[in-house]
Amino acid sequence: MITARYLPLVALLSTMIGSPSVLAAGGGDAAGAVPAQVLSEQGLYRVEVRQAPEPLPKGEHFSLGLRVVSMDNPDTPLEASAVTVEAGMRHGRDDGFAHGMQSEPVVSVRDGLILVEGLYFHMGGAWTLQVTIDGDDGEDQAWLTLPCCGG
Amino acid sequence: MSRLCKGAALVAALALAVSTPSQAANETAFTDAERAAVRALAVSPGHTPPEASEPALADFGKRLFFDRRLSGDGRFSCASCHQPDRAFTDGLALPEAVGRGTRNTPTLINVADNPWFQWDGAADSLWSQMLLVVENPRELANDRLNLAHTLYRNGDLRAAYQRRFGPLPPLSDGERFPAQGSPHAAPDSPGALAWRRMTAADRDAVNRVMANLGVALAAWQRRLIRYDASFDRFAAALAEDPDPPTNKAFPAAARRGLKLFVGEAQCTLCHSGPDFSNQAFHNLGLPVADHRDTGRERGLRRLTASPFNAAGPYAGGDDDAERLRFLPPPESLRGAFKTPSLRNVARTAPYFHDGRFATLEEAVRFYLAPPEGETLGEREATLDLIPDLSDRQVADLVAFLKTLDSAPLPEAVTTPPSP
């Protein structure tokens, strides 16, 4: 069940925005934290993770709160309709997922953020969230590595 | 043998003699990472669900469980296949009840901890899964109207039901409540036509009776909880000591097997948590068997179509309807089946959803060399992570799996009630 207890605010350090070390596609790692933000593959968009449970839960649904902006217009977030998501585990693959989730997330807007509900990780390890953005600047994809799940 | 070779052999023998004790220690001592992985398999006190809070309701559920009147022909009960002295399984590849089933009978021990029920997760609550069994023509082959009438005309059942749930509908009114009928009866059969002719309110009343019977059965099944295997005692010792003493109940082979289980063999990717199941559905690339069972694909279709799911009018306060918002497209999980718990696995042969493997060793070896043949859906690539294992490693894994048997449940729980 998704409850507010799974949505503690992840501290998004404003000083990190624009930091080259963070602005790398495929941010995050299996053992570490949820990335604060990533750039899309072609550099058209930035995906910021504004809300996430800490740590991400295993075997329970959870939500992420995202803010997606165009790099040409970073003060105006994109609408939820411009965003679709998919998640899975690569298990060492360069392309594609070895398997996906067993749930289908729902994307909506809440409190000014793009809310991705219904994420569900059934295995420990590094999951990858694929965010597909179809905005005014064209279509692009961002990849976030999400660690599952604590300790 | 030349002198040089003799010398080399001697050095090798000495090296072997010197290295054996440390090798043995490495084989059975646990690293911090392994201990953490074992902790994740152990049961925390808060994990075990409470026993049924209503003893009278659980007792009624137990009576129903052993009662052959639940089947259409009066010959079979739940206990016909879920036999208490076989860890609530039947020892068969496929169950034999009114007909021959298509899926292996799963254990009911710790079943209350499951989030999804049946091999395909067609039920999202313990109480609602019983309806799938009662109306399955291969299992109890009953229909809900006939079962409601059975309850109504048998004083013992009727009294027990009404004590908890209140009056039954006026089932003596044959016009309103035909003798037989179900929405799952064959299309245009008398049972299907009878069901459709009923008013919506009367159909709802019969459905409510079915749901209540399920609630009673679920209350009893919440008593079937056991987390007291040799493994649990070893895990508790390991939490205190990285190299606890070996004993007969958890021998050296089992220790090596456990290290493999949480490490190199990658078993905990799916067999994780205190039930040794991630409660997810996986396509193992099994060659198609007779029934061309689509697994979770069919389960999702049945679940979403059922008025007894958590979003339906018969759901209780504990049922989780929220997760139904996020169900995946059924076809995405074609050929996938639920990861079974491994607790009591040595007592629950044969294995896999269709009982295709007779022994634990056969089941383990499947993962090392998947058989070829037509499959349904897409084989999950997670399986490629499993390395080849030596014969000894397979034997060690099997030795470990044999430590997951729990102590017998109390006789008061498992003995059929007196008539």
Image (cartoon, coloured by chain):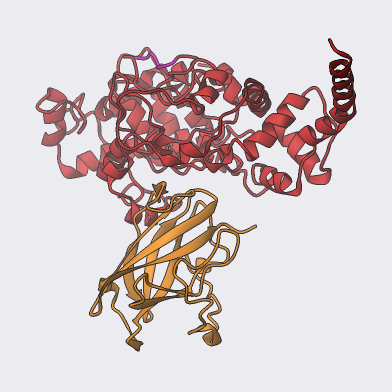
Chain colours: A orange, B red
Q: Is residue A129 above or below residue B165?
A: below
Q: Position of residue B51 (x, y in %)?
A: 60, 40
Which secondary structure is most common in the magenta stretch? loop
Let me know if residue B96 is in the magenta part: yes
Left/right placement of residue A143 relative to residue B307 reads right
Residue B374 falls in image quadrant? top left
Q: Quadrant of the N terminus of chain B?
A: top right
Picture quadrant where residue A68 is located: bottom left
Q: Which residues are magenta?
A: B93-97
Of B174 and B326, nearer the camera is B326
Residue appearing at x 30%, y 39% in the figure? B297
Q: Is residue B126 visible?
A: yes
Q: Residue at x 54, y 16 (%)?
A: B359
Whether residue B275 appears in magenta in the rendering, the answer is no
Q: Residue A86, relative to residue B309: is it above or below?
A: below
Q: Give residue B256's position: percent from left, percent from top.
A: 72, 30
Q: Depth check: give the residue in front, A40 or B127.
A: A40
The number of callouts visible is 0
| Residue in the foreground of this view, choosing between B89 and B49 | B89
In the rendered view, would you say A86 is above or below B306?
A: below
On the image, the x and y values in percent for residue A139 come to: 26, 71
- On the question of residue A1 being in view, the answer is no
Query: In this rendering, would A35 be left or right of B401?
Result: left
Q: Is residue B244 left or right of residue A34?
A: right
Q: Give how far across and how far down residue B184 sits, in percent.
A: 21, 31
